[in-house]
Image (tube, rainbow, N blue to C red):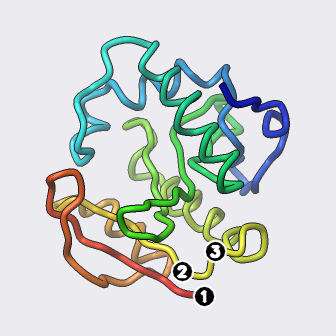
Amino acid sequence: MVDNSQFATEKITETNRLILRPFTEEDIPALFLMNSLPEMLTYIPMEPFTEESQAADIYHNVILADYAKHGFGRWAVHHKADNKVIGFCGPKYLPEFNKVELGYRYFPEYWGKGIGYEAAQAAVDTFQPKFNIDLFIALILHGNQGSEGVAKKVGMSLFDQSEYLGHKVHVYQREF
């Protein structure tokens, strides 16, 4: 198991409404919900989680491992006014593409409020100065117009079409 104490209080960045920070063990219930609600998984190629232990496994073996290995990974998006984690946004190194992906996902009650763009722009603004990320991609399943809109708003453009986990994806890309 990876020690996350160095990440526990670190804030990556913030906006007027949001704080982007590393996930902590206390966020496992939110991770479970993000990966179990069918409406949140419409464009995510995975089966919904059925037990909170699956989220704990992702937290300990994927998220913390990414933080330790790369210095970054998916970040919790904390909504200041509601004082809770409402999704995630942040970079993840994808060895299949040998590139860093900007990924994001939010609870449905926050869709259509500009949260996706606000968090993604804040994340992108930290890529170069904090993490030396000069090029990043977004893998977006065909038909996911909301995610494509966010990608375009943060300056990404359609670069390629590919497959990921057996699904056709649009590959958006941006360089600094």
Disc 1 packing (10 Å; few <14; some 14–19; many ≥20): few
Q: Quadrant of the N terminus?
A: top right
Q: Is residue 99 left or right of residue 149?
A: right
Looking at the rendered structure, the secondary structure element under dot 2 is strand
Question: Which residue position holds label 2?
Answer: 135
Mark 2 to mark 3 CA distance (whole Å): 6 Å
Q: Of all residues shown, which one is farthest toward the bottom?
A: 176
Work out whether residue 62 or residue 35 is closer to the camera in this orientation and state it. Answer: 62
Marks 1,3: beta carbons within 8 A: yes
Question: Which residue position holds label 1?
Answer: 176
Q: Where is residue 167 in the image (x, y as percent from the top left)?
A: 15, 55
Marks 1,2: beta carbons within 8 A: yes
- Residue at x 61%, y 46% (from the top left corner): 75
Q: Quadrant of the C terminus?
A: bottom right
- Residue at x 42%, y 67% (from the top left corner): 150
Mark 1 to mark 3 CA distance (whole Å): 8 Å
Number of labels in the image equals: 3
Where is residue 133, by image quadrant? bottom right
Mark 1 to mark 2 CA distance (whole Å): 6 Å
- Residue at x 41%, y 80% (from the top left corner): 173
**Label whose residue precedes the other's in the sequence (1 or 2):** 2
Marks 2,3: beta carbons within 8 A: yes
Q: In this view, does 87 lie above or below 161?
A: above
- Residue at x 64%, y 31% (from the top left corner): 82
Q: Looking at the picture, which amino acid does disc 3 mark?
A: Ile
Q: Looking at the picture, which amino acid does disc 1 mark?
A: Phe
Question: Which residue position holds label 3?
Answer: 133
Q: Where is residue 163 in the image (x, y as percent from the top left)?
A: 19, 64
